């Protein structure tokens, strides 16, 4: 990609004209015969991202659980609401900032944790980190990154990031990951609750493709001292017992071995002679998540970290109440982008029920199904304090690298700003619920 100014950085810092600035930049370029590198609507963005991705990458990133009903539910729930713009409101300026966990964010957006992005780009985490830093949108690092969190944090040069954790069956590994998150400057710890097991994902299953089995998306683990200790113990135990698993020599097995060897930290040739790369993959698959995760585990969190605690994956109002009783700092209403349980409640429907159950005060983030600025508007009107952007930014990465991520963010922010300007909403932190109504056209 040629060097271009960051679309967000080139926008004025005052938020009142973000939408117009983005439009003007695109139309001005159009006069010179240039088109935006990244499509400005989601359907075309998705088509272009699919073209730019391998079959396995597309299956993993775009795919969902079962027959995809939860993904469709996420979108259908938005279609059931309509925005009702107000006229002659006299409001020429908007403030898109929100305050979250004591920090002010320039827009009500964060980048969701998205694992195994190496399928799209070997340096996915670094590109996304730099795009997040350039646009001022906090990046929630995935536990399933390809790059160790310390390196990704360094790429952000002090811009805000949070760290997401999957609760391992090894409690010392949980502590080690939390300690590294704190040391790397994470501003919050996001514990994802909905992936104690991997959902049934036919797109990946049909290709027999799991990125982690190729050594992709396990960089936070292979860089972790406690994880490496567990791997070393397992290798030593296997040697003592003389139990190294036999692998059939097929072309696929050789390709997988090469991929695992390449992904492992250190030199390829040293790795090729070592048992550690393969043992790391096997160890990861055994221990990365705890199917027995319970509220009693979560109760221990407060003593284990000084970071604000965010629970991601809440859908049921009772779970939301329980989280509030536990005293967590925020929850994320999310169904993991429809990747875990098929025929699950739409995330937007869950948001409405959760807000009703816990009232206006607890901090609630919304995730799963955000595609446009108008979607963000609707989620905020239903009481979300901010929204997580997931697949759209990965599609931007597939189409245009770091610049592509920045453009996707800039486009969504621009549309949100224009939607607010055209409806009379002055503050993203207080979008009035009566600006939305059940969609009479549905
Ligand atoms: C995810 N998601 C996710 N969540 C998480 O807590 N840790 C993770 O490692 C991942 N990995 C991951 C990979 C891919 C390819 C996708 C698409 C999603 C879920 C993510 O954080 C977010 O909840 C969803 O992306 C939201 O759905 P939409 O809006 O992207 O459809």
Image (tube, rainbow, N blue to C red):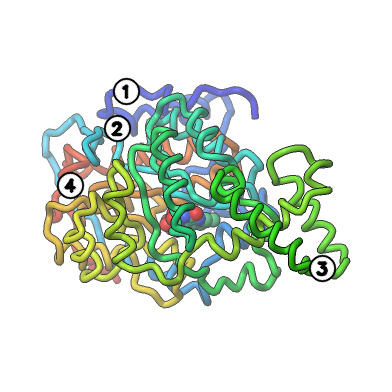
The Cα–Cα distance between marks 2 and 3, rounded to whole angstroms, is: 52 Å
CB under 8 Å between callouts 1 and 2?
A: yes
- Nearer-the-camera pick, 124 or 22: 124
Is any part of residue 70 visible from this angle? yes
Q: Which residue is mark 4?
A: 431
Dot 2: element: loop
Q: Earlier in the sequence, mark 2 or mark 3?
A: 2
Q: Is mark 4 within 8 Å of ligand 1?
A: no
Which one is closest to the eye, mark 1 or mark 2? 2
Dot 4: element: loop
Q: Earlier in the sequence, mark 3 or mark 4?
A: 3
The residue lying at 64 percent from left, 72 percent from top is: 205
Q: Is mark 3 within 8 Å of ligand 1?
A: no
Characterize the local packing of mark 1: few (<14), some (14-19) or many (20 or more) Cα atoms within 10 angstroms: few
Q: Which residue is mark 1?
A: 13
Which one is closest to the eye, mark 2 or mark 3? 3
Q: Is residue 191 left or right of residue 284?
A: left
Q: Is mark 1 within 8 Å of ligand 1?
A: no
Q: Which residue is mark 2?
A: 106
């Amino acid at each position: 990609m040629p060097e271009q100014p960051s679309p967000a950085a080139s926008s004025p810092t005052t938020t009142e004209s973000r939408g117009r600035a983005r439009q003007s930049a695109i139309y001005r370029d159009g006069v010179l015969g240039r088109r935006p590198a990244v499509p400005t609507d989601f359907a075309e963005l998705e088509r272009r991202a699919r073209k730019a991705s391998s079959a396995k990458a597309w299956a993993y990133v775009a795919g969902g659980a079962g027959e995809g009903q939860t993904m469709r539910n996420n979108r259908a729930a938005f279609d059931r609401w309509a925005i009702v713009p107000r006229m002659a409101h006299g409001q020429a300026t908007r403030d898109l900032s929100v305050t979250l966990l004591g920090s002010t964010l320039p827009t009500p957006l964060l980048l969701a944790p998205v694992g195994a992005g190496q399928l799209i780009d070997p340096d996915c985490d670094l590109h996304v980190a730099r795009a997040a830093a350039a646009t001022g949108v906090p990046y929630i690092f995935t536990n399933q990154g390809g790059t160790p969190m310390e390196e990704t944090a360094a790429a952000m040069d002090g811009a805000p990031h949070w760290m997401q954790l999957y609760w391992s069956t090894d409690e010392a590994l949980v502590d080690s990951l939390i300690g590294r998150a704190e040391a790397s400057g994470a501003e919050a710890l996001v514990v994802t609750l909905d992936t104690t097991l991997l959902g049934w994902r036919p797109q990946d299953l049909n290709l027999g493709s799991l990125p982690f089995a190729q050594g992709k998306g396990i960089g936070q683990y292979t860089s972790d001292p406690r994880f490496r200790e567990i791997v070393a113990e397992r290798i030593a135990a296997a040697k003592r017992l003389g139990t190294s698993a036999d692998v059939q020599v097929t072309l696929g097995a050789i390709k997988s071995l090469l991929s695992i060897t390449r992904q492992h930290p250190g030199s390829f040739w040293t790795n090729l002679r070592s048992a550690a790369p393969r043992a790391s993959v096997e160890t990861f698959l055994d221990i990365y998540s705890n199917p027995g995760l319970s509220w009693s585990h979560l109760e221990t969190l407060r003593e284990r970290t000084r970071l604000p605690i965010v629970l991601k994956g809440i859908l049921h109002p009772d779970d939301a109440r329980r989280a509030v009783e536990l005293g967590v700092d925020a929850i994320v209403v999310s169904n993991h982008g429809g990747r875990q349980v098929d025929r699950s409640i739409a995330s937007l429907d869950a948001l409405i029920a959760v807000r009703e159950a816990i009232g206006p005060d607890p901090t609630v983030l919304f995730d799963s199904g955000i595609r446009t600025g108008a979607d963000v508007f609707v989620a905020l009107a239903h009481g979300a304090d901010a929204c997580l952007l997931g697949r759209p930014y990965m599609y931007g990465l597939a189409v245009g690298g770091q610049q592509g991520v920045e453009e996707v963010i800039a486009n969504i922010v621009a549309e949100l700003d224009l939607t607010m300007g055209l409806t009379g909403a002055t503050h993203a932190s207080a979008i009035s619920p009566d600006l939305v109504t059940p969609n009479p056209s549905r």
